[in-house]
């Protein structure tokens, strides 16, 4: 493989965090990032704990953390980003990927645009993780994955492909996707920035978060955060942590706050490692399944914690 799977998992989560935070300038931990981070971490923790998608467990964890989302374009983007852990966990099986992405969306009230955005981003991440992502075929493949839909996302993705084939610059693309349909335009711009600079994470994110007016309105800044976060997730999955500038990674780690452990970058990276281990079959925490150690139906509470490792070349895809 060009990059290790664990590096791509890390790159996806770190990329989303970076893309969202860079657009907010000095506000490295904006509320938009915090909401995404909290939802994503809770989702990862659930997948690690149970080894599968369990909506009831996701709901319980969100209720415990008092995560209640209102319907706005920015929140809709956060919903798309919150499904990224599912895309990571199911990346090797397109059928399960689609099924589980649609299932996890049941946690929130959403419209067809959110659904298509979730499927498009999740599928692109899955192709990157399996090293099947081709810039020339990604958009047609993504549209096929969306299946028949009433939204404008397929048309806008085709427009993205046309702009890239024409060598259109950033300003032209921004003008093209500056209409009222903010969420679908955000998805389109993210794909444009990602595919336009496929091998350059830094440039992709900088283009996604660029705005020539330093005195932009808060709504414009939030859109830039959303575009940057999605672009960062896509580019991070493709380029892994190896493609993320070291000084950016160091900056984020320095910005970590002990008071916000649930959304800290270092915490998210640790969870990414554990998620890879659970997906691969390497990770097993006997404390999560104590009933499996029984003596005539009674749990053996005196058994010491076990570490389980797989033999070489026997780890299989889920």
Image (cartoon, rainbow, N blue to C red):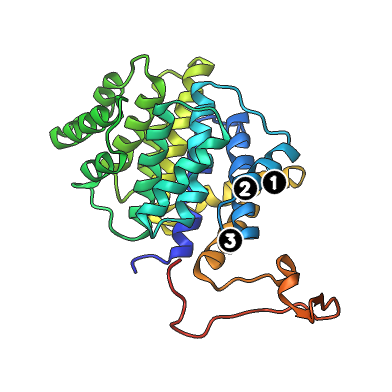
Is the residue 233 above or below the residue 76 in the image? below
Mark 1: give few (<14), some (14-19) or many (20+) Cα within 10 Å.
Answer: some
Horizontal and vertical percent position of residue 98: 39, 47
Q: Which residue is mark 3?
A: 51
Residue 255: percent from left, percent from top: 65, 44
As measured in the structure, the alpha-carbon distance from the residue carrying label 1 to the one carrying label 2 is: 7 Å
- Residue 235 at least partly seen: no
Give the farthest residue toward the left: 166
Q: CA distance from mark 3 to mark 1?
A: 20 Å
Image x and y of residue 256, in percent: 67, 46
* For residue 50, above or below residue 66: below
Is the residue marked by circle 2 packed among few (<14), some (14-19), or many (20+) residues within 10 Å? Answer: many
Q: Which residue is mark 2?
A: 41
Say which of 234 and 256 sits in front.
234
Q: Secondary structure at mark 2?
A: helix
Farthest residue, direction right: 302
Above or below 253: residue 306: below
Q: State if disc 1 and disc 3 touch (CB < 8 Å).
A: no
Count of labels in the image: 3
Left or right: where does residue 200 sit relative to residue 87? left
Quarter holding residue 184: top left
First reached walking from the N terminus: tag 1 or tag 2: 2
Chain-order first, disc 3 or disc 1: 3
Q: Is residue 228 visible?
A: yes
Mark 3–mark 2 Cα distance, whole angstroms, equals: 15 Å
Instruction: Look at mark 1 in the image and give the residue it sits on.
Output: 262
- Which residue corresponds to the image point at 33% horizontal and 18% vertical from the top-left? 178
Q: Are marks 3 and 2 in contact (CB under 8 Å)?
A: no
The structure residue drawn at horizontal position 61% and vertical position 57%, both measured from the top left corner, is 271
Q: Position of residue 183 (x, y in %)?
A: 41, 25
Q: Quadrant of the N terminus?
A: bottom left
């Amino acid at each position: 493989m060009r990059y290790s799977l664990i590096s791509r998992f890390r790159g996806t989560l770190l990329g989303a965090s970076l893309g969202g935070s860079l657009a907010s300038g000095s506000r490295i931990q904006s509320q938009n990032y915090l909401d995404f981070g909290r939802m994503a971490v809770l989702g990862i923790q659930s997948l690690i704990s149970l080894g599968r998608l369990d909506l009831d467990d996701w709901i319980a964890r969100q209720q415990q953390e008092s995560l209640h989302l209102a319907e706005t374009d920015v929140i809709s983007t956060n919903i798309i980003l919150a499904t990224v852990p599912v895309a990571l966990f199911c990346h090797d099986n397109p059928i399960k990927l689609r099924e589980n992405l649609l299932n996890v969306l049941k946690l929130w009230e959403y419209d067809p645009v959110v659904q298509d955005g979730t499927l498009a981003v999740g599928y692109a991440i899955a192709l990157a993780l399996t090293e099947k992502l081709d810039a020339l075929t990604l958009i047609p493949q993504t549209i096929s994955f969306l299946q028949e839909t009433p939204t404008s996302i397929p048309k806008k993705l085709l427009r993205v492909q046309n702009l890239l084939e024409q060598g259109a610059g950033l300003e032209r693309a921004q003008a093209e996707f500056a209409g009222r349909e903010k969420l679908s335009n955000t998805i389109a711009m993210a794909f444009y920035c990602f595919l336009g600079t496929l091998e350059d994470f830094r440039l992709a994110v900088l283009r996604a978060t660029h705005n020539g007016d330093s005195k932009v309105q808060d709504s414009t800044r939030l859109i830039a955060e959303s575009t940057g976060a999605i672009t960062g997730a896509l580019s991070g999955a493709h380029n892994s942590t190896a493609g993320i500038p070291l000084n950016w990674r160091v900056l984020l780690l320095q910005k970590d706050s002990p008071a916000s452990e649930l959304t800290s970058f270092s915490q998210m990276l640790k969870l990414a490692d554990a998620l890879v281990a659970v997906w691969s079959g390497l990770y097993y925490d006997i404390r999560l399944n104590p009933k499996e150690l029984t003596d005539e139906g009674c749990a053996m509470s005196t058994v010491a914690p076990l570490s389980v490792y797989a033999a070489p070349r026997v780890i299989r895809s889920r």
